[in-house]
Image (cartoon, coloured by chain):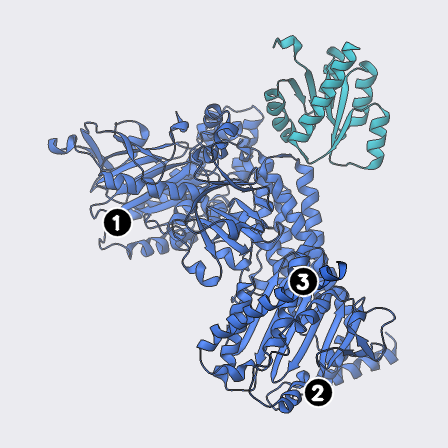
Amino acid sequence: MDKQDKTSILVLDDEPIVLKRLQPALERAGYTVETFSRSADAFDRVDGKTFDIVITDLKMEGSDGMAFLTHVKKRAPKTEVIVITGFATMDTAKESFKKGVFDFLAKPFKLGELLEAVKKAEARIKADKNA
Amino acid sequence: MNSSNKIKNIGKRIIKSIPFFSSWLKRDSEKMSFTTVFARFQDILELNNQILDLMATISNKLGGDYIFDRNYIESSSHLMADLIAKLISNFNILTHGKYRQLNDVFRKINREIEKELSGKLVIPETDYVIPYSSLTRDFSEVAGGKNSNIAELKNQLGLTVPHGFAITTRAFQSFLEYNNLTEKVNIILHAWRGGDKTTEKASLEIRELIDKGKIPPDIQKAFNWGLDNLKTYSDDKKIGLAVRSSALGEDSEHSFAGQYESFLNIFPEDLGKNYKAVIASTYSASAMEYRLQKDFSDQEVAMSVACQMMINPVASGVIYTLDPVSPERRVLLITGTWGLGAPLVSGRIDGDSFVVLREPGHKILELEIVRKKETLVPSDKGGCVFQSVPNEKQTQATISETQVKFLAETALAIERYFKKPQDIEWCLDKNNQFYILQARQLNIASKISAVINDISSIVHKYPVIFSKKGAIVQKGIALGKVFVVNNEEDLENFPNEGAILVTHQFSPILARVVKQAHGIITDIGSPTGHMASIAREFSVPSIVNTKIATKLLTNGEEITIDAEENVIYRGRIEELSLYEFSHDNIGEYYEYRLLRRILKRITPLNLVDPKANNFNPEGCETFHDITRFIHEKAVKALREVNFYSQRKSDILARKLDSKVPLELMMIDIGGGLKENAGRKKVTEDEILCLPMIEFLKGVDAPGAWDNEPMSVDFGSFMSSMTRTFSTGAASPRAIGQNLAVMSKEYVNISLRLGYHFSMIVAYISEEINNNYAYFRFNGGVTDPVRRGRRAKFIGRTLEKKGFYVDIRKDLMVARIKKISKESLKEKLYLIGKMVSFTRQLDVKMVDDDQIDLFIKKFEELEKLEELEELKKLEVKNTEQA
C-alpha cells in the first residue's frame, strides 16, 4: 500500500508509556502514527496537518484534552476522535459524545479494544468518502 | 475531667487490678450478639473477595494485553490499601483486637508501596552479605539477577553451583553514604542528563569518586564473615575468588551483558579493591548509555556483587537453549573449551560445538570439534594466564555425548523454571562435577516472531482433548507429562523434573509443587483464589474449574496446555512454546517494573500452611498474606463462637421436628427459617437455610440412618443417641443440646450423636469464593483404636470426594472451599449422610480391614440411592401412563 493511502493517526497522552505501547501496535496494524506527550505540540501539529483519526487522553497535567478535541473537531470535522481516559465518568463521556467524539475508552483498556475502535472509525471515514 | 468521672475511672482501675473482676469486665465488653459477629464475618468475606479480585485484576495488567499508565498504578494501589485497611478493621472487631499487630504489618507494607510510588527504589533492610544457601529470587532486589538466579538454581532446582555469597545493594548504598558520594553522584548525573557533561566525562568522574572511597568497617566485617564461611567449603587454605557484577535487572529480562566488570581468581584480601572496581563499572559509559536507551531511571541503579569460590575447571562452555539465529530449528547450542570459559564467551577463542535437539532424548544433530591451541587457567599468583594445550588434547572433544545430553536436560529445566530461553555458562571440574556458573535470559523474541508466522495451522495438526472448559488463571504454554494428584501423599511423588499437575481441587496445599509444575489443570477451583495467585506468581500456565480434567487425562500421557486459547492438546507442540517466547518484552517499560515491584508487596503468598509456625501476623509479608491470615482466622473465630452464652432472650431457640431424632435446637440469625415458622417447633419444610436443607437430606438419605450397624440393643442405642453428654472429659461449653445457628447461606451445627461430637460449618452462596464446608468429627464409645479407625474411614471417604482431610488419632477434620454452589450442596448432603451412617460405627471397627469394608458399604449406599431415584422415576412414569 502506498504511504499516502494509509490512515493517519495522531496520539496525544502525557504518559509516555501509553505512546510507547500504542505506536508500534498501530504501526503493525498498518497505520501511520505520530505521537505527542505535550498538548501544545499536538495543537501545533493539527494546525499543520489534518489527521484521519486522533486518539487523545482527557485529563493531562497542565492541559485539557477536552479543549484539544474541541479544537480538532472545529478545524477538521471529518477527523474521528477516540478518547482514552483514566478518569472516566458518565459526565465526561456524555460531554465527549456531544462534541462529536467517535468512541470513548476507559483506561486501562486492552490493546485489542483500541484497535477495534480504530478499525470502526476507519470504516466510517471510508463510508463517508464514498457517500 | 469532672470529679465524678475521676472517681469512676479510679474505681475501674481498682477493679481491673483484681484478676477476677478484670476478666469479668472484659467478658462483658467482649460480648457481642451473634448477629453482630456474623455481620462482621460477612463483611470480611465480601472484602476478601474484592481484594482477591483486585489482585487478579491488577496482576492481569502485567500480562501485556492492557495499556495502563502511572495513574492506574497509583489509583489501584490506593484502592487495594483501602480494602486491606477495612478488612483488618472488621477482623479486629470480630476477634476483639486479638491480632492488633496486623495494623503495624499493614502500615509497614503500605509505606513501602508509597515509597515505590514516589519513585524511590525501596532497598529492603538487609544484611551486607547473604550466602547463596539462604538466597532466593525474592532477594533479587538486593542481590541482583546473577546472584539470585544462581542461588535459586541451587536451592530450588538442586543444581550444583559455585559456593558464594551476594554483596547486597545495601552495601552499595552504605558505601556511597559512608563516603558522602550519593549527592555528588547525583549532581554529576543531573549535569549529564541535562547535556552539560558528556557520558565519558560523567562516567570518569563518578568512577574516580568510587575508586577513592573507603570500604566502611561494617562492610569489611561482613566480607570477612562471608569469606570465612566460604573457606569452610574448601580443603585448601588458599582460595581464589570470582568477583562479578550482579546488578538489578541484569540477567533477567534485561541483558546488560558485558556492561560491567568481572574479576577472576583474586585473593580474598583483595576483595575490597575488586568490589570497588565492580561497583564503579555501574557507571561505565556504556552502562550509562544503555540505561538511558532502555528507559531505566537513575533511581533504579543499585549494584550488588557476586563473590564466588573460584573453580579450576577441566572444561567450560556456554549453552543456548535455542538457536538465536534459527529458533525454529528447536535445538540447543552447546559449546565447550578446555580450562576457563571467559575467552570463549568474549570470542577470543573458538570452542567445540554441539547442536542438540530440544525434544526428550536430545539427539545430537551436529558436532564440530575444533583445534584448541590455548587455554585460560587460574594462576598461582592470582588472576589467570593463557597456556598452550598439549598436542593430544587439542583435537579431543571437551565433553562426551552423555555429558552433552546431561547439559541439555539441565539447561531445559532451567529454561522451564525461568520461562524464557536461556544463555547459560557451565564448567566441569576434575572430579567430573558439572557446575552452572550463570543463567540469564536469551533475548530472541523478535527473531522467533519472524519465523513463526502461522501458528494456527501448526496446532491444527494435533488432536484436542478438550477446550474452552473452565477459566485461565495464568496464560502461557506448557508441555509435559500428566501427573494426577489425588491427595497430599501424591505430592511427595511429584517428579523433580516437573510435570503437568492435574488435580481435582486447586488448593493451597499444592503450593509446594507449583514451582516444579510445567502447567496446572484442575476440575474445580476459582481463578481468584489464593492458589491462583501463586500460579501467577510463578507464571505457571494454569486452567482451573474444567470439571473434567481428572476424568480425561491419565498419568504419564504427553499433553500441551495452551493457556492462551484454553485448549488441551494430545502430544507436545514445541512450536507453541516457541511462540510464547516471542511475546513482547513489556519488561522494557518503567511502569511495568514499577507495577511488578508494587505487586511484590501485594500478591506473593507466604502463609501457605495454617499449621506452620509462621502463620501469625508477624509472618505476613504481603497484603495477600494478611488477607489469607484473616480469612483463615475469621472462619475459625466464627466456628468457635460460644453459642451457648450468646443466646439472648431476643433470639428464639426452636426445636427441629424431624423424621430422624436429632434433638436439634435452631437459632435463626437471618433468613434461615420461613417467617411464619413455628415459634417453638420447626418442621423441615420451614427451613430456608441452604446448607441445613442439604445436610438434613443427607441425614435422611436412604439406608443411612436405619442401616443398623451395631450390635447394642435398640433401647440403649436410642438413649445414647439423644442423651446429653456429661462426662468430665467434655468441655463445659459442649454440654447442652444439639444446636444449629443459621442464616440463609450459613450454618454452624454442633451435634452429639451417640458418643461422638461433630461440628459442621458451611456457607453456600452463588459466589464461589465464599463457599466452604468444614466438618469436624471426634469422640466415640469404644477404645481409641477403634475410634481412630472410624476417623480413618470417614477421612478416606471424604478425601475421595475432594475434601482435604486431616486425621489425628480419633479426630478427623475435613475441609473444602471455593467450589460451586451445586457441588457444595452435594458435599453437605454427603456430610449429613456420613453423620447418620457413622453414629456408632466405632463399635464395629474391630480391625483395620473394617475401614475398607465400610468404605465399600458406604459406596453401596450411593448405589441404593440411585436405585431409589430410578424407582421414583418408574412410579412417576407409571402414574403418567
With respect to residue B345, does B876 lie above or below? below
Tell me how far mark 2 sits from mark 3, CA to CA. Answer: 46 Å
The reply to whether dot 2 and dot 1 touch (C-beta < 8 Å) is no
The reply to whether dot 2 and dot 3 touch (C-beta < 8 Å) is no
| Dot 2 and dot 3 within a common chain | yes
Q: Mark 3 or mark 1, which has the lower sequence index?
A: 1
With respect to residue B267, does A35 lie above or below? above
Q: Which residue is mark 1?
A: B239
| Dot 2 and dot 1 within a common chain | yes
Which hue is chain B drawn in?
Answer: blue
Q: Residues within 10 Å of mark 1 (few under 14, many from 20)?
A: some
Q: Is residue B114 left or right of residue A69?
A: left
With respect to residue B639, does B754 lie above or below? below
Picture quadrant where residue B873 is located: bottom right
Q: Nearer the viewer, mark 2 or mark 3?
A: 3
Q: Is residue B99 left or right of residue B206?
A: right
Q: Position of residue B142 (x, y in %)?
A: 48, 47
Residue A18: assigned label? none
Q: Mark 2 or mark 1, which has the lower sequence index?
A: 2
The answer, for residue A98, to whether it is visible in the render is: yes
Q: Quadrant of the C terminus of chain B?
A: bottom right
Which chain has been coloured cyan in this picture?
A: A
Q: Chain of mark 2?
A: B
Q: Which residue is mark 3?
A: B825
Q: Disc 3 residue type?
A: Lys
Numbered disc 1: secondary structure: loop
Q: Disc 1 residue type?
A: Ile
